[in-house]
Amino acid sequence: MSVYGHFLCGFALLLISTGALAAGELDVRVTPSNSALKSNIEGYVGSLDGRDAQSLRRLRRIAEGEADKAAQALGYYQARIRSHIEEGETPRLVLEVEPGERVRLRNVNIRVEGPASELSAFRVPSASRLKTGSVLNHGRYEDAKRLIQNQASRYGFFDGRFARQSLEIDPAAGVADIDLLFVSGPRYSLGDIVFNGDFPFDEDLLRRMVPFQADTPYDSELIAELYQALQSSGYFESVRVDAIPTQADRLRIPVTVALQTREPRTLGLGLGFSTDVGPRLRANWTRHWRNPQGHSYGVESELSTPRQNVGLWYDVPGDPPLTDKLRLAGGYQYEELASKDSLSRLLTIGPEWHSQRAGGWQRVLSVKWQREEYRLGDDSGLSTLLMPGVSYSLLRSDNRLDPNEGYRLQFDLAGAVDGVLSDANVLHGNVMLKGLTTVFSNHRFLGRVQFGGTETNGFSAVPPSLRFFAGGDQSVRGYDYQSLSPENNQGDRIGARYLFAASLEYQYSLTDKWRLASFVDQGNAFNSLDFPTLKAGVGFGVRWVSPVGPLRLDLAHALDDDGGVRLHFSMGPEL
């Protein structure tokens, strides 16, 4: 037979087999209509694909039995089930079901005894789902037992057991009784922690990452937090944490941590683009540790047409090391401001103290010395300032890269005193609030408000890095980057004392990855708080959720400008 003939025969067999697999259907008819019962019966009986009429006849009684089990699982113990076969090109097994009255709960007794009953976090299954008069549902009964057992495992009641667990059903009377009694036994505790592996760190550093003390009552969440803390430290390639109850000695479970250290140095390169600064190149080099105390240092740089900078940092871990640290930082930045007629050369150096405060707030205390050489149009100057500062930030979201709900708060304040290594009196502050909520799965609403101000008795001595400019991707769309600013006599934008910007955006999710957006932005940079003139822009855009966060492409129209429509492109998390 030729190759062509083999192909035709194979294709014909494929069609025949496909037709055979398509044969056989299940048709469940519940009277009166009951979608939950119908779906449950279909799940119990399963697929009938590939069954011919003769096979369906042999399966009738089995299918009726499975349908009866499915009905009982939902409390229908008096269901009447009949079946017949409808022949034809596609044979069909028809199950006709009359559910009858559902069994209802009469007596419900669910109790936890022992030390677990005194633990407020240990929840007894909700009485709203299992109470006298409720319909019987076997799944809820099993869920109640599973909830108790899972909590016992989480909180360390490893000797706990059900002294009584019964579900007694009287189908004739249409009632059922539940009796669950869980005796928890003693609660285990977390014992001594042992670190294994080849690592160059002092054990004191590792122990400062442990979120519990020895002899703390067992909680599996503490083990998960320990794993996350070590993994997030940046020191290790792999982390394994074991706390095995069967190894307990007098109810104390030893905790064993196996660590594999990562490569000490990494180099990162990245390309980006935004319509504010155009193409940009980012590079960083990090030495993840330099001594047994876990000190680290690195270099970061960014290159774009209007802005080039390089920064160096040296970190000393605090207690706890993941959130608290002392950072010594310095950097140099060259930036063209608003136009090529204005520029800034900024040198900064100074310490920063990072810490996490109550409620999840991140606080940064800093003392920065900065020296800035600048030109604003025809005006030029040299500024030297020593600026102590404080920053507070709070992020709450259900996802770091692409949240559906959340908000961010940011407050910054810094100041300098003339004569204290400074040549001007300056108080500089900034407030940022962002919020995001999602309703009915597909409808997302984003809001942003920002206000900044600089108070001084000599604004002409304030350098550009402490002045405000508005407009651009992250400010007021529809206007060019830093184009909203007071101007001097020559028309050069020279920055302002104050900034206000607000945005409201609506997004509609087409798929998990694609969204349409519409927005309105308003704001400006100005020198007086007396009824400032705000500029507005409106537009629409598209969002694509990439692995590094949403990519945003917007077309925006400036309502208070003759510039027409502007394209804006940016990327990164919404919050």
Image: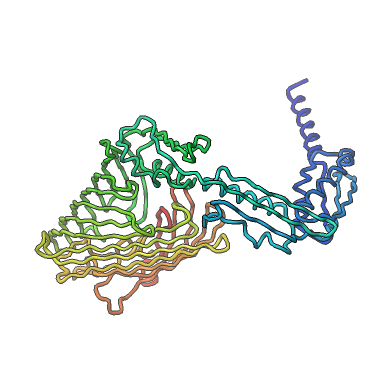
Location of residue 337 in the rendering, given as x and y in whole percent from the top left corner: 24, 59
Q: Quadrant of residue 9?
A: top right
Q: Quadrant of residue 240?
A: top left
Extreme residue toward the bottom, this view: 530
Please determine whether, in this image, residue 436 is positioned above or below residue 287. Answer: below
Res. 493 in view = no
Location of residue 330 in the rendering, given as x and y in whole percent from the top left corner: 21, 49
Location of the N terminus (image quadrant):
top right
Left or right position of 514 against 388: right
Instruction: Give the colour scheme of this rendering.
Output: rainbow
Extreme residue toward the top, this view: 1
Q: Nearer the viewer, residue 484 or 122?
A: 122
Q: Quadrant of residue 228?
A: top left
Please determine whether, in this image, residue 310 is positioned above or below residue 178. Answer: above
Q: Residue drawn 42% across and 54% down? A: 573
Extreme residue toward the left, this view: 419
Left or right position of 527 against 91: left
Q: Residue drawn 68% across and 57% down? A: 109
Location of the C terminus (image quadrant):
bottom left
Q: Nearer the viewer, residue 454 or 122?
A: 122
Res. 380 in view = yes
Q: Residue drawn 34% across and 47% down? A: 322
Left or right position of 473 against 515: left
Count all numbered tags in the image, as a single digit.
Answer: 0
Location of residue 528 in the rendering, given as x and y in whole percent from the top left corner: 25, 75
Location of residue 323 in the rendering, given as x and y in whole percent from the top left corner: 34, 50
Left or right position of 474 against 399: left
Q: Nearer the viewer, residue 32 or 124?
A: 124
